[in-house]
Each structure stands twice: as structure tokens, then as C-alpha cells.
Amino acid sequence: MIKQLEVDGVPAVLAPVTGEMHAGLVFRVGVADEPLVRRGVTHLVEHLAVHGLGDTGSHVSSSTGVEHTFFHVRGSAARIATFLNGVCAALRDLPAGRIDAEKDVLRAESAGRTPEPRSMWRHGARDYGMPSFGERGLDGLAAEDLHAWIAHYFTRENAALWVAGDEVPPGLRLDLPEGVRQPAPVPSSALPVTPAWFAAHGEELAWDTVVRREARAAVFANVLERRLARDLGCEVRTEYEPRASRTARITAVVPDGGASVDGLTGVLAAMRDGRIEASDVSTVVELTCEGLRESEGRGRRLPGQAFNVLAGRGVRGVDEAIAEVRSITVDDVAEVSAAAYGAGLLMAPVGTVSGPDGWTAAPGSSASAVSGRTRRARRNRTRRLVHGEDGVSLLDGDAIRTVRYDACAAVLAWPDGGRRLIGHDAIAVPVEPALYRDGDAAVADIDARTPAALRVAMPPRDPDTIPQAPRGWWPNG
């Protein structure tokens, strides 16, 4: 039985468990809250808050997600109190001497990851599109930026606690700054039409969708996994990710070469049309109910209940959750399937030139160019750079890429003069001064029209990688 209470003004959920005691402190802040120019700030705060807090008698972990950041600890009540007290103390007084070292740690971690691109194609270069971007903002973050981020998000009113145990650990003090509850961002959209598709840079085949957050959507995700594995003959990974906005993201990832676009979309279309095996639904329902019972006994439902508290929803007992799952029918799953198909985004392997019937290509270019000074590329008469009062456009044949200054997410700036403007829709315009006549003047004009707050200072590039005009260019080219 989950009990609701408060600890030092922080809402908390408590439940007895079989096994080791554990607890967690969650804040309603994640990468979706970060502007592109500050990408990585939440992760950096998380790392600094736990530095030096682990010991041999407890297991600690922390994580920065899309909407939430949490700190988790297993061990005795005393060790739980010591760890969470230490997190709160660090948030009040960050170890500033560790900032540069932790930046290096995050850069090393990032070097081993490949961001998934689907978030960017669906949402652009803001809010829920941020998982597609690396932590570009790390270099420009100073101690005052971290303190401001903590004052806004890592506060008593924007936190929740869960405790899997018989009581709140004696001595636990959640000494956090005062603040206000921060709602999750409203998801933006870079897709004018769905279902949509785009071609990736690799061989992976994947699909995602956004549907209403509910138990039958979670059941649909698991039924889809079973159906894909059976029909495609390969291991397929699906995931159901609930969001604070009463929606959920469902993803399906097929291993490289595991299936064709037609194979994946064929299964999705069949389920959309209601061709769903009743045995798949009943099996998933039973497995889900068993999982809920097991999770209840081990305290695994508590983090989700704490997240619900932060989103303004009530705590749900396990019997209520199980009753909802048991009521799900084939027709329910079919309804979710139809909604999921309609909102779908397909990532096809590199080289794919056309999408499935009824799927629209996601926009990879802009509808129009800005007005302003036009500079032709040297040795390339079809390529033109236009910069003016409203923004910058790159015209290459019939393709247009435009970033307007009033919809610019960031300007990546290299010491050699290279610039890359990234729009809210994730469309980017590279500006390499050596490739255009009077290119330095174009860069100066762009710098004068873009706020310094949007500029991300990039490290020097290897001279051999800086684009240069081909030999033999003509001065009026």
C-alpha cells in the first residue's frame, strides 16, 4: 500500500518492500527544458551533485532524462539519508572546483554515444528534440549558469521523493532552495503531416509515434513487439515512454538488416486495420499484471508514482492499475494502433529515396529564402548564400535551407570564421567564408544580427578540415 506524505515540504510516496531498502529524489527537469545553447547543463548539475557521495555500503546512481532528473540509492536507512542529504547540500553549494573536470567526464561519455535522430525530425531543435543533439553547451557553461539553473529547477517545490521501505530514514533532511513547480514543456512539432518518413545516415530501421498516455497504449507497445518479432523473424525492441503531458512516446527499433521498410510498415498497417491476434493481447495483459504485482513488492512502481505527483496526478494503487489492464480488449488495442499509425515517424535506412504509400517525406529543406545580399559560391554557380535583415539562406540548385533570426536555436562559431546556424525546425545553414567572395563580410553581418546569447563557441578545427575554395577559383565567382 503506497502512502503519501511530505518530507521537509517535498511530496513523498512510501511503501514497504521485500528486499533491500532504496529511495530516490526526482526533479521535474530534463533535457527537454534545455535550450540548444545550454545543452548539457542538467547533466552537468547531476554529475556535480553526486561527486564523492558513493561509499562501499550503498549503491548510488543518478540519471538525466528527457523530463526528469533523479538520484537513487540502495542501502541502510542511514546511508540513504547520508546520500540524499549530500545531494541537497551539493545543490546548495556546488563543488565549483570540479566543473571543468566533470565537463571532461561528460565529453568522454558523449564520445561513446550516437544521438538518435528521430526526436529532432519530429520536434526540431528545441524541447523534445533535444535528445538528438550532443551536449554542445558545455564549453560555455560557467558556475553562475549552473546556479541559475538550480535556482529555477532544483527546488523544493519542483521535487518529489520515493522511499521503498517501512519508514522515512531518520535524519533525512531535504534542505533544498525555495522555488515553484515547473510544468513540462509543450512539445513542438517539425512535422506538418504524419505519418512521415526520412532517410537516416545508417542502416537502422526505426519507427516512433506519440499517443495518449494510458494503459492500453502500453499494452499496444508490447503486442507490437511480439507481432514484429514473429512476422519479421528478428529481435525487435519496442519501448513505451510516458510523458508528463498525458502523452506517451512509443518506439520500435529493428536491428540493422533485420527487416525491410515494407515489412515494418506492413505490420503497422495490419494492426491499424484491426488485424490483431486475441492471444497476443491476452498474453501481454497477463504478463503486464504479473509485472505490476512483482514491481509493487520490490518498490519499482514508486518512481513512477513520484513522477505522477510532480505532474499533478494522484497515486494509483496496484489493484486499480491491474483492473485497468485486465479490462483492455482487442478493440482497445486496435484503436491505439490506428492513432499510433496516423502519428508515426519512420526512419528508413540510408539511400531510401521514397517512402511507403501514404507516408509523406519529412521536410529536410525550407519553403522559402530570405531577401538580402546574395553571394555565389566559388567554382559552384548553383550554390548561393543569401543573408539579410531577417536571416540566412543557402540555395543549392532547387534546395533551400533557411534559418530566420527570430527562429534561430543556436549559432555554432569556430575561431576560423566558420558558422553554422541551426533553426528551431532543426534545419541548418553552414557558412564557410572561404567558399564565397567576401565571405568574411557575410560572417560579420551574420554576427552583428545574431544575439551573443545564441552563439556557441566551438573549439579550433584542424586546418585540413576547414572548407576552402578549390584551386583555380576566379575572383568574381
Image: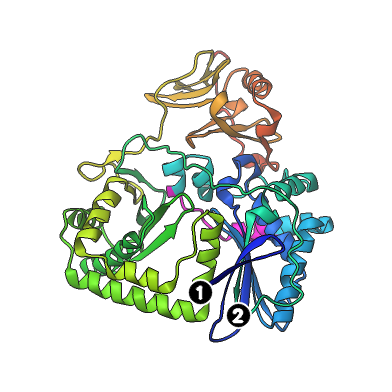
In percent of the image, x 16 and y 57: which residue is there? 274
Residue 235 visible from this viewpoint: no
Question: In terms of depth relative to the viewer, which is nearer, 296 or 377?
Answer: 296
Instruction: Give residue 80's position: percent from left, percent from top.
Output: 70, 76
Please give the label number shown on residue 165: 2
Question: In terms of depth relative to the viewer, which is nearer, 347 or 84?
Answer: 84
Q: Is residue 445 left or right of residue 219?
A: right
Q: Is residue 251 left or right of residue 311?
A: left
Instruction: Give residue 58's position: percent from left, percent from top.
Output: 69, 80
Residue 4 visible from this viewpoint: yes
Q: Is residue 82 above or below residue 417?
A: below
Q: Which residue of the protein is positioned furthest toward the right in this rendering?
A: 97
Q: Which stretch is magenta?
A: 105-118
Q: Is residue 440 left or right of residue 339?
A: right
Q: In this view, does 61 lie to the left or right of 142?
A: left
Please give the label number shown on residue 300: 1
Give the amino acid at mark 1: Arg
In percent of the image, x 35 and y 34: which residue is there? 192
